[in-house]
Image: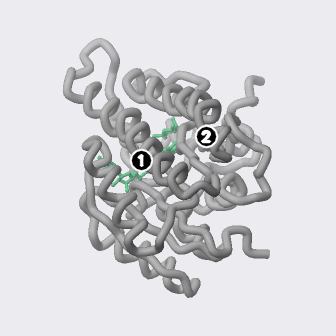
Amino acid sequence: MKLLEGKTVVVTGASTGIGRAIAIGAAEHGADVAINYARDSAGAEQCIAGIEVHGRRAIAIRGDVADPATATDFIARAVEAFGKVDVMVSNAGICPFHSFLDMPVETFERTMRVNLHGGFYMCQAAARQMVKQGHGGSIIAVSSISALVGGEYQTHYTPTKAGLHSLMQSAAIALGRHGIRCNSLLPGTILTEINKDDLADEAKRKYMEGRVPLGRLGVPEDMAGPAVFLASDMARYVTGAALLVDGGAFVNLQ
Ligand code: NAD
Ligand code: RM4
């Protein structure tokens, strides 16, 4: 069964990793997809090819999500290409692992701007378009297990992920009357570019694997099904919720 037939899905930061897997997963379920990407045009092209394999239309728009103008441009270009926006997946994010006491101001501020401010502008721009269209929609913020738990080298990052979840809760209230649902997706540890260096440390990787009751770290494709579910009418009464997709890592105290 195809869950997103006839829908237009937009995904930020989709040239790699979780964003790419969600964009392709949406196409597999019948959606046309517009992707935003920062710099990696080869990665964006691979994502486009992955969407087109499923017989769906795709466009890639370059832009830095930290700039509010990127969001309005991205939504305008998606509407120009496909006529509407039904689903926003705000996924772009960075996690430059760093210790707390000597965190450079620029590292903190850039992480906030990309992850939290960028997510805000993207979700707001998509919501404005959905309200104008008048037939509801689904907004998904890619938050994290890190919205719920800390990380020694993530003191700049985890607040952005908690903030994104909080944004979805408040936006769910603000947009409910328009039939727009807002939810956050909370991945656990998924093997992507963002943590390649961090998990190159064999001891850390083994430790992280050992925390997962399902016995392995995640891969980007593990996130596609949960995102498609939240995007689809199967989740028509789900808003303000958080879906943890972590192989059970969060509940594994002892
Ligand atoms: P990734 O590095 O492969 O993907 C991040 C994407 O965001 C990249 O395509 C990157 O180019 C893009 N991006 C970064 N800055 C951008 C900017 N300023 N403008 C536009 N695009 C930008 O890593 P990923 O794991 O796929 O990360 C995707 C999202 O998932 C992030 O928000 C991350 O915080 C979140 N997440 C990842 C994990 C994990 O374990 N991998 C866990 C929880 C949450
Ligand atoms: C996630 C979580 C993962 C980490 C990535 C970068 O939110 O903390 O463990 O690898 O971020």
Label total for image: 2
Is the residue marked by circle 1 packed among few (<14), some (14-19), or many (20+) residues within 10 Å?
many
Query: What mark, if any, has residue 184 been given in the picture?
Result: 2
Residue drawn at x 61%, y 25% is 148
Residue drawn at x 63%, y 53% is 136
Instruction: Check if mark 2's residue and mark 1's residue have beta carbons within 8 Å.
Output: no
For label 2, the SS is strand
- In the picture, measured across the screen, residue 181 lies left or right of residue 24, that is right
Sequence-earlier tag: 2 or 1: 1
Quadrant location of residue 212?
Answer: top right
For label 1, the SS is helix
Q: Which residue bears the numbered disc 1?
A: 125
Q: Nearer the viewer, residue 81 or 115?
A: 81
Quadrant location of residue 74?
Answer: bottom left
> Label 2, label 1: how many angstroms apart (C-alpha)?
17 Å
Three-letter code for the amino acid on which mark 1 is drawn:
Ala
Is the residue marked by circle 2 packed among few (<14), some (14-19), or many (20+) residues within 10 Å?
many
Query: Is label 1 within 8 A of ligand 1 (CB to nearest ligand atom)?
Result: no
Three-letter code for the amino acid on which mark 2 is drawn:
Ser
Q: Picture coordinates of residue 149 (x, y %)?
A: 58, 23
